[in-house]
Image (cartoon, rainbow, N blue to C red):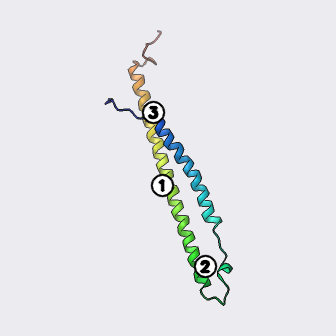
Amino acid sequence: MSNGMRVDLSALDEVIRKLLGLLGDMESAKTKAKYETNIPSSAFGNDKFLESNALHAAHEEEKVRIENIIRGLHDLIEKFGTSASKVKDKYAEQEMAVEKNMGGGSGGPKGSAY
């Protein structure tokens, strides 16, 4: 079945490891965007500054937009990592099956002791 091509499973492992690290970084970004970018409406002015409410509303809209962008990126990275992990597992299973078949089902190329 093999056409002489091989898949570097260690490279797939490295991709998966880096994606997991990136997911950790994305969690930090998600937390910061949600909790560390709050600006109270009073920071934009008081009732005498009529545009203060509009500025605060615009800030809140952009804050939510950024949170949604980060959530979307997080979901995309998570989906890609899950897919890469499944692909690696399938290749590893196939490699084990090929090795088993090449050994005649005896567990290795030397044959069985029985």
Q: Is residue 111 above or below residue 5?
A: above
Label 2 to label 3: alpha-carbon separation = 54 Å
How many numbered marks have been drawn onto this rendered protein structure? 3
Mark 2: few/some/many CA within 10 Å (<14, 14-19, 20+)? some
In this view, the residue in front, 38 or 72, is: 38
Label 3 to label 1: alpha-carbon separation = 24 Å
State which tag comes first along the sequence, 2 or 3: 2
To which residue does mark 2 refer?
56
Q: Quadrant of residue 39?
A: bottom right
To which residue does mark 3 refer?
92
Mark 3: few/some/many CA within 10 Å (<14, 14-19, 20+)? some
Query: Residue at point 46% right, 49% down?
Result: 80
In the rendered structure, are the residues bearing label 1 and label 2 in contact, judged by CB atoms less than 8 Å apart? Answer: no
To which residue does mark 1 refer?
76
State which tag comes first along the sequence, 1 or 2: 2
Query: Residue at point 58% right, 80% down?
Result: 55
User: Amino acid type of disc 2?
Assistant: His
Quarter the N terminus occupies: top left
**Helix, strand, or loop for circle 1?**
helix
